[in-house]
Image: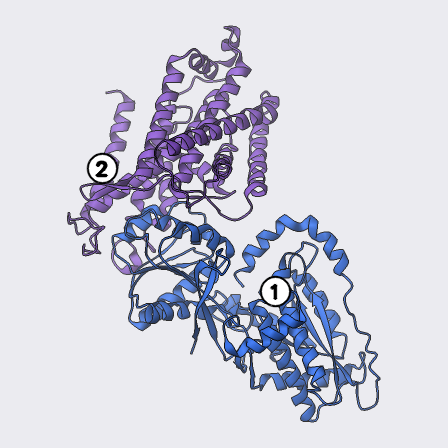
Amino acid sequence: MSSRQIEVCVAAHLLAIWSLVLYKSCNCSDYSIWQEGGDPHAMNLTLVLQELVIGITTGAIYALIALGYTMVYGIIELINFAHGDIFMIGTMMCITIFDQFGITSITHLGGFPLVGILLLTCLISMLVCAVLGVVIERVAYRPLRNAPRLAPLISAIGVSLILEDVGKLWKGITIVSFPQVFPQVNYYIGPIYITSVNILVLAVALVLMVGLQWMVSSTRTGRAMRAVAQDREAAALMGVNVDRIIATTFFIGAALAGAAGLIYGLQYGTTNFTLGFFLGLIAFTAAVLGGIGNLVGAMLGGVLIGVIQALSTLIPDSNAGGFGLPHGGAAWNEAIIFLVLILILVFRPSGLLGQQLPEKV
Amino acid sequence: MKRSWSRIFALTMGIPLLLGLLAACGSGTTGTGSGAPTAAGSTIIKIASELPVTGADESSGKPAQDGAQLAVTQANANHTIQGITLQFVPKDDVGPSGTHDPAQGAANVTQLVSDYLVAGIVGPFNSSVAKAEMPISNQAPLAQISPANTNPCLTKDTAASGCSGSNNQISTLRPTGTVNYFRIATTDDHQGPAGADYMYTTLHLSKVYVIDDTETYGVGIANAFVGEWTKLGGKVLGHSSESPKTTSYVSLLTQIASMHPDAIYFGGVDSTGGILVRKQMLTVPGLANLPFGGGDGIVTPTFATTLQPTGGGPVYGTVAVVDTSQSQTAATFRTQYAAAFTDPLNVYSAAAYDCANILIQAIKTALANGAHTPTSSSDAAGGKAFRTAVIAAIQNINFTGVTGHQSFDANGDTTDKIITIYKMGLNSSSKPDWLFASSVTVQ
């Protein structure tokens, strides 16, 4: 086995052990706990599996956003702090599009109109975010490409703050409701359920991630992107239009954030102008966890963080007596996520699937 | 005043518009004390109001000022105090930012303190403004009666509200040690218990899960709720503290669903998790139709407009005001108010009306007890003596007004502790809103 395989294996085992510890630490029973009459205090396997489902769906959204960070870092070694805010603009764009179609929280659509509107909203949101990403690159990053490394970092933070204010001007300072156009149906697999919205989120994320992977590995543009990432000057000498390829990278990364905006809204039902900061931070962490610059790493990192976050909720509340953390694990999930991140980075500085990049001079 | 949060934020948007307004409002009545200064004392006594009445605060403060003005007009028309004409001096504490401004409030009070014909102030409206004003009026001393301040820390040293020990503000706010600041609004620390009483006793719920937002207000109200709930015999399934920046509560809610609670109580405001928790409850099987409760931090227009249309279980919120929009005893007041002003009546109109009437009755009592009015606006000695007599009269007052029977405890807080319960629903014009559900008297 290669070292990478060993590490994936270790990560999978850690996850399994975690689940097992949670499972063992509880009084487990196997009937459905969602129905009235179930033992209310049994923290059982059902709950662990249910949290896993939630974690994977949340993680899929993190992964989509993380891809944007990792692609940009991979190609120009810039941490695009504005990326989380592009995602936030995406959520707001979707609300505006729904408004244009006269769709509110209480609109019930079905069949073809629903699919059509979701598809159209997704495409418009992706396009708007993609164009926004390209414009940001052109205005705030390209002129600084040969400047000291800190300069584009600062302009990235600046763009992030500007976008937050744009969001504030656009939808106001309060939390904005996202129309729940996709009807929620709960599908039970034994005692575990998965909602129709969860399935949609996973499907959209999967299609986009597979599409991206295919594009990068099998198309001419993808090959050019890899070439620029490896050695910008050599790529230019080989006839690759570096500026165009970098713009394309921003286009694709931001488009993914636009799609993430739609599925985030459908899943959680709200947005506000500060959303991009927190989700951006989590997604950036996911990208680093997976190995920044590595596409599969970002996907893995996103899902892993979603799962850690969901499972940490199950750590019992020590205030109620016994083992656990004060106020329960949910209050500590950010600390737990970053603890895991630190541990992984200490042993594997380039992330789970990170590759040692050739030394740059 | 937890709700002032949303106001503070709302304001950042309208500043440029407000600058113009402010310029127009700078020159109010400044009374020159022209009231025939005879040896027997002035026949003119001034009653001031110190409220935010322009800019973003207009809809909350202006109806309160109108209420106070109505009381003064009526007292003059009825010759409530023989031989004295009351003059109403309205002050506005909206500052350059377009919202209530502690610095502006302090400047107003300093000005009022220097006019010795002013016998007392109705106001302020916001607890942050009160903190700036109280040390000034206390040293004068000049009576202040607030219709709306609900922050417990202004008058008390309470651990639950985060102002005990080194955070105790009383020595700063009340440097002379003598109470001159009174309020007829119930303090926030009674909201949690009142919410628990209502949900346990009236709604017959017994198992509750409590979530707070880790902030002073949220933790305080949640702890007070848990204390009362347990005392009543209810079961608290769990109490978790979630960072106000949390974006997903779904994992936690899924775990909560497995405990089968009768209700979820949230300690915090709409933007620190109130809206998100309630919204995400809809997606978790078993919680979609569960009752949800909270304090005045969730009783906001944003909460109602965001969540009313999406359905789900009932939502209840507590607010530390007396809702006079329903009571029979306030019917006359509502009619008189509507005849005199065009500003729509709000819950603070009646409160300010009562504050002004308490002040008027106290002036009358002080005079009956032998106090003399100051001879002029600059009669410092006479003014101080008169103001001290008025403060003493307020401290011992027994007054029945439209908000109920008012008297004050040793801290200056009302003994008529009423919390109003609101339920989210559709108002008469079919818009999402908070509707009066009940009122709870705290013992």
Relative to B11, is A78 above or below? above
Relative to B207, is A166 above or below? above
Say which colour chain B has.
Answer: blue
Left or right, B170 with respect to A350, comes to right
- Image coordinates of residue B135 in percent, x first then y, are 65, 71
Q: Dividing the image into 4 quarters, which one contains the C terminus of chain B?
A: bottom left
Distance CA(mark 1)–CA(mark 2): 62 Å
Q: Chain of mark 2?
A: A
Q: Among all residues in the image, which is located at the extreme left? A: A30
* Disc 2: CA contacts within 10 A as few (<14), some (14-19) or many (>=20): few
* Viewer-closest of B94 and B214: B94
* Disc 1: CA contacts within 10 A as few (<14), some (14-19) or many (>=20): few
Left or right, B372 with respect to A258, comes to right
Secondary structure, mark 2, is helix
Residue at image position (35%, 67%) is B199
- Image coordinates of residue A173 in percent, x first then y, are 55, 47
Q: Which mark is residue B344?
A: 1
Q: Chain of mark 1?
A: B
Relative to B118, is B102 above or below? above
Q: Are marks 1 and 2 on the same chain?
A: no
- Image coordinates of residue A301 in percent, x first then y, are 35, 32
Say which colour chain A has.
Answer: purple
Residue at image position (35%, 56%) is B313
* Viewer-closest of A238 and B148: B148
Q: Mark 2: which amino acid?
A: Ala
- Label 2, on which residue? A16
Left or right, A356 with respect to A193, comes to right
* Viewer-closest of B111 and A22: B111
Relative to B84, is B190 above or below? above
Q: Mark 1: which amino acid?
A: Pro
